[in-house]
Image (cartoon, grey):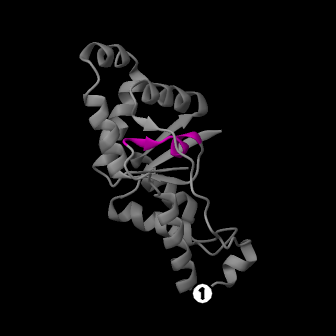
Protein backbone atom coordinates (compact mmCIF):
# COMPACT_ATOMS: atom_id res chain seq x y z
CA UNK A 1 0.00 0.00 0.00
CA UNK A 2 1.16 3.53 -0.65
CA UNK A 3 -0.14 7.04 -0.16
CA UNK A 4 -0.62 9.63 -2.86
CA UNK A 5 -0.95 13.09 -1.38
CA UNK A 6 -2.11 15.93 -3.58
CA UNK A 7 -2.70 19.61 -3.02
CA UNK A 8 -6.42 20.28 -2.60
CA UNK A 9 -6.18 23.41 -4.74
CA UNK A 10 -4.30 22.97 -8.00
CA UNK A 11 -3.27 25.39 -10.75
CA UNK A 12 -6.04 25.75 -13.36
CA UNK A 13 -4.75 23.29 -15.96
CA UNK A 14 -4.09 20.56 -13.39
CA UNK A 15 -7.43 21.26 -11.65
CA UNK A 16 -9.24 20.87 -14.98
CA UNK A 17 -7.43 17.59 -15.61
CA UNK A 18 -8.38 16.34 -12.12
CA UNK A 19 -12.04 17.23 -12.68
CA UNK A 20 -12.03 15.51 -16.08
CA UNK A 21 -10.35 12.44 -14.56
CA UNK A 22 -12.87 12.29 -11.70
CA UNK A 23 -15.87 12.76 -14.00
CA UNK A 24 -14.80 10.55 -16.88
CA UNK A 25 -17.80 8.39 -17.77
CA UNK A 26 -15.75 5.86 -19.63
CA UNK A 27 -14.63 2.87 -17.56
CA UNK A 28 -12.08 2.19 -20.32
CA UNK A 29 -11.23 5.84 -21.06
CA UNK A 30 -10.85 6.42 -24.77
CA UNK A 31 -10.32 10.19 -24.64
CA UNK A 32 -7.20 11.52 -26.35
CA UNK A 33 -5.14 12.21 -24.37
CA UNK A 34 -6.57 9.78 -21.85
CA UNK A 35 -8.02 11.32 -18.70
CA UNK A 36 -5.56 9.27 -16.63
CA UNK A 37 -2.48 10.36 -18.58
CA UNK A 38 -3.39 14.05 -18.66
CA UNK A 39 -4.24 14.11 -14.96
CA UNK A 40 -1.19 12.24 -13.68
CA UNK A 41 1.21 14.25 -15.86
CA UNK A 42 -0.17 17.66 -14.88
CA UNK A 43 -0.62 16.93 -11.19
CA UNK A 44 2.77 15.25 -10.57
CA UNK A 45 4.51 18.45 -9.36
CA UNK A 46 1.69 18.97 -6.85
CA UNK A 47 1.89 15.52 -5.25
CA UNK A 48 3.90 13.61 -2.69
CA UNK A 49 4.07 9.82 -2.67
CA UNK A 50 4.83 7.86 0.48
CA UNK A 51 5.15 4.14 1.11
CA UNK A 52 3.34 2.71 4.09
CA UNK A 53 6.66 2.69 6.00
CA UNK A 54 7.33 6.36 5.15
CA UNK A 55 3.84 7.36 6.28
CA UNK A 56 4.28 5.38 9.50
CA UNK A 57 7.51 7.32 10.17
CA UNK A 58 5.77 10.65 9.48
CA UNK A 59 2.91 9.66 11.81
CA UNK A 60 5.36 8.62 14.50
CA UNK A 61 6.98 12.06 14.41
CA UNK A 62 3.59 13.75 14.35
CA UNK A 63 2.53 11.79 17.44
CA UNK A 64 5.84 12.52 19.18
CA UNK A 65 5.20 16.25 18.83
CA UNK A 66 1.39 16.15 19.26
CA UNK A 67 0.68 17.27 15.69
CA UNK A 68 -2.11 14.70 15.27
CA UNK A 69 -5.03 13.78 17.47
CA UNK A 70 -6.85 10.48 17.84
CA UNK A 71 -10.29 10.48 16.28
CA UNK A 72 -12.78 8.12 14.68
CA UNK A 73 -14.23 9.12 11.33
CA UNK A 74 -17.94 9.60 10.89
CA UNK A 75 -19.18 7.07 8.33
CA UNK A 76 -20.33 8.33 4.93
CA UNK A 77 -24.08 8.02 4.54
CA UNK A 78 -24.31 6.70 0.96
CA UNK A 79 -26.06 5.72 -1.07
CA UNK A 80 -23.29 3.74 -2.69
CA UNK A 81 -23.37 3.10 -6.44
CA UNK A 82 -21.92 0.44 -8.66
CA UNK A 83 -20.51 1.46 -12.06
CA UNK A 84 -23.78 1.04 -13.96
CA UNK A 85 -25.78 2.96 -11.36
CA UNK A 86 -23.21 5.77 -11.38
CA UNK A 87 -23.37 6.04 -15.17
CA UNK A 88 -27.17 6.24 -15.00
CA UNK A 89 -27.07 9.29 -12.70
CA UNK A 90 -27.55 12.72 -14.21
CA UNK A 91 -24.83 15.37 -14.07
CA UNK A 92 -26.60 17.26 -11.26
CA UNK A 93 -26.95 14.08 -9.19
CA UNK A 94 -23.26 13.27 -9.64
CA UNK A 95 -22.25 16.80 -8.72
CA UNK A 96 -24.37 16.70 -5.56
CA UNK A 97 -22.95 13.30 -4.61
CA UNK A 98 -19.39 14.59 -5.15
CA UNK A 99 -20.15 17.65 -3.03
CA UNK A 100 -21.40 15.41 -0.19
CA UNK A 101 -18.31 13.22 -0.52
CA UNK A 102 -15.99 16.24 -0.26
CA UNK A 103 -17.77 17.42 2.89
CA UNK A 104 -17.39 13.95 4.40
CA UNK A 105 -13.72 13.69 3.39
CA UNK A 106 -13.02 17.09 5.00
CA UNK A 107 -14.54 16.26 8.39
CA UNK A 108 -12.72 17.66 11.41
CA UNK A 109 -13.06 17.34 15.15
CA UNK A 110 -14.28 20.55 16.81
CA UNK A 111 -11.78 21.90 19.31
CA UNK A 112 -9.02 19.46 18.34
CA UNK A 113 -5.55 20.68 17.36
CA UNK A 114 -3.69 19.25 14.40
CA UNK A 115 -4.63 16.53 11.94
CA UNK A 116 -7.07 13.71 12.71
CA UNK A 117 -5.02 10.49 12.80
CA UNK A 118 -7.44 8.53 10.63
CA UNK A 119 -6.73 10.83 7.67
CA UNK A 120 -3.11 9.66 7.66
CA UNK A 121 -3.69 6.03 8.62
CA UNK A 122 -5.68 5.04 5.55
CA UNK A 123 -5.62 6.16 1.96
CA UNK A 124 -9.17 7.47 2.25
CA UNK A 125 -9.67 9.53 0.25
CA UNK A 126 -9.48 12.18 2.96
CA UNK A 127 -9.01 15.92 2.74
CA UNK A 128 -6.61 17.37 5.30
CA UNK A 129 -7.81 20.93 5.76
CA UNK A 130 -5.74 24.10 6.01
CA UNK A 131 -6.93 24.60 9.60
CA UNK A 132 -5.74 21.11 10.57
CA UNK A 133 -2.36 21.73 8.94
CA UNK A 134 -1.96 25.16 10.54
CA UNK A 135 -2.82 23.65 13.93
CA UNK A 136 -0.15 20.99 13.43
CA UNK A 137 2.46 23.52 12.30
CA UNK A 138 1.61 25.86 15.20
CA UNK A 139 2.12 22.94 17.61
CA UNK A 140 5.43 22.12 15.91
CA UNK A 141 6.66 25.68 16.44
CA UNK A 142 6.20 25.11 20.20
CA UNK A 143 8.51 22.07 20.20
CA UNK A 144 11.82 22.85 21.91
CA UNK A 145 14.61 23.76 19.47
CA UNK A 146 16.76 20.77 20.45
CA UNK A 147 13.96 18.26 19.80
CA UNK A 148 13.15 19.91 16.45
CA UNK A 149 16.83 19.89 15.46
CA UNK A 150 17.03 16.19 16.33
CA UNK A 151 13.94 15.41 14.23
CA UNK A 152 15.17 17.57 11.36
CA UNK A 153 18.34 15.51 11.08
CA UNK A 154 16.03 13.07 9.24
CA UNK A 155 15.63 14.20 5.63
CA UNK A 156 12.25 12.50 5.33
CA UNK A 157 10.93 14.47 8.32
CA UNK A 158 12.17 17.72 6.76
CA UNK A 159 10.38 16.82 3.50
CA UNK A 160 7.21 16.02 5.45
CA UNK A 161 7.21 19.35 7.31
CA UNK A 162 7.90 21.14 4.02
CA UNK A 163 4.95 19.28 2.44
CA UNK A 164 2.70 20.47 5.27
CA UNK A 165 3.85 24.06 4.83
CA UNK A 166 3.31 23.99 1.06
CA UNK A 167 -0.06 22.26 1.50
CA UNK A 168 -1.23 24.98 3.87
CA UNK A 169 -0.62 27.46 1.02
CA UNK A 170 -2.46 25.23 -1.48
CA UNK A 171 -5.80 24.58 0.20
CA UNK A 172 -4.74 21.54 2.23
CA UNK A 173 -4.19 18.13 0.70
CA UNK A 174 -6.03 15.02 -0.39
CA UNK A 175 -4.88 11.61 0.84
CA UNK A 176 -5.41 8.73 -1.60
- Residue appearing at x 40%, y 60% in the figure: 14
- Residue appearing at x 33%, y 51% in the figure: 130
- Closer to the camera in the image, 56 or 139: 139
Q: Position of residue 154 (x, y in %)?
A: 40, 18
Residue 140 position (above or below residue 88)? above
Residue 32 position (above or below residue 96)? above
Q: Is residue 118 magenta?
A: yes
Q: Position of residue 103 (x, y in %)?
A: 47, 65
- Range of the magenta residues? 113-121
Residue 33 visible to an observer of this rendering: no
Dot 1: what SS?
loop
Residue holding disc 1: 90
- Residue appearing at x 38%, y 52% in the figure: 129
Residue 77 position (above or below residue 125)? below
Q: Quadrant location of the N terminus?
A: top right
Query: Would you identify the image quadrant in which residue 152 lies?
Result: top left
Q: Position of residue 48 (x, y in %)?
A: 45, 41
Residue projecting furthest to the front? 111
Q: Is residue 54 magenta?
A: no
Amino acid sequence: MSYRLEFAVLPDEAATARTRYEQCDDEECEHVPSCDDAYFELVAPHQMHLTIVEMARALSGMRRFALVHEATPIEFEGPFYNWEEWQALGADERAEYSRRERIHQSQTVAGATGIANFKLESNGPWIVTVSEIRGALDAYRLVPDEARADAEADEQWVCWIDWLRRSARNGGFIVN
